[in-house]
Amino acid sequence: MRRFCYFWSKIAASITMKKQTISFELSVFESLEELNEQDHRLMLLAIAARKDAYAPYSNFKVGAAVLLENGEVVIGSNQENASYPSGLCAERVAVFQAGAKFPGVTIKSIAITAKSNTHLVTKPAAPCGNCRQAISEYEYKQQSPIELILMGEQGDIIKCQSLDDLLPLSFNNSYL
Ligand code: THU
């Protein structure tokens, strides 16, 4: 009898279950020169910021440049620590600084780039999960998309229209 009930509950589940696909579109550029002027300039600032990363442990230097609606640009680079988890990624250094210096000003886009002292980074630098969550907070708060322009040291550059594309089904304030 118990097995019978289980069987029927499974049938019921398969009748109501729906499948959904989440997809997103991104743009791929082969060089910095292909970017529009604003994105190009922002990426050059991220490259400059990358040079000041403090990354003696990973030797992986990341730079981020945040463009705000008021035209200001706030930069960040990863800042490591002998107690590894105490360090912070470039993206969060930049967006937290933007939030602290220009509270309430909408973030339009973020350029991110990475370079290693040990190998050539040819893949676009994708923000880590913690940084996605942190940027997502600002996107949700401002209710407008934040574009991301991602680059390694060389190679393709990708542009995403919104952080939400990189973190679908995200947790935010609406659950609280
Ligand atoms: N890092 C960033 O700055 N941003 C990311 O999104 C990924 C990782 C830094 C953290 C650490 O200093 C080094 O890269 C290696 O993980």
Image (cartoon, rainbow, N blue to C red):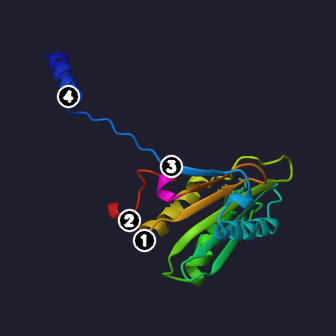
Give the amino acid type for the residue marked by disc 4 in the picture.
Ile
Q: Which residues are magenta?
A: 161-165
Residue 89 image-quadrant placement:
bottom right
What amino acid is at disc 3? Glu
Q: Which residue is mark 3?
A: 25
Q: Give residue 120's position: percent from left, percent from top.
A: 82, 47
Task: Give the residue drawn at x 22%, y 24%.
Answer: 10
Residue 111, how many percent across, how many down?
65, 64
User: If the image is split into quadrants, where does the N terminus sit?
Assistant: top left
Q: Indicate the position of residue 23 as horizontal and vertical percent values.
A: 45, 44
Residue tagged by mark 1?
Answer: 141
Separation of residues labelled 2 and 3 (CA atoms): 26 Å
Q: Residue at x 43, y 54 (%)?
A: 170
Disc 1 to disc 2, how far (Cα)? 9 Å
Quarter-wise, where is residue 81 in the image? bottom right
Q: Is residue 109 left or right of residue 2?
A: right
77 vs 167, left or right, is right
Q: Nearer the viewer, mark 3 or mark 4?
A: 3
- Count of marks overlaid on the render: 4
Dot 2: what SS?
helix
Q: For residue 173, which numbered disc appears in the image? A: 2
Cβ–Cβ under 8 Å for marks 1 and 2? yes
The residue tagged 4 is 15
Mark toward the start of the polypeptide (4 vs 1): 4
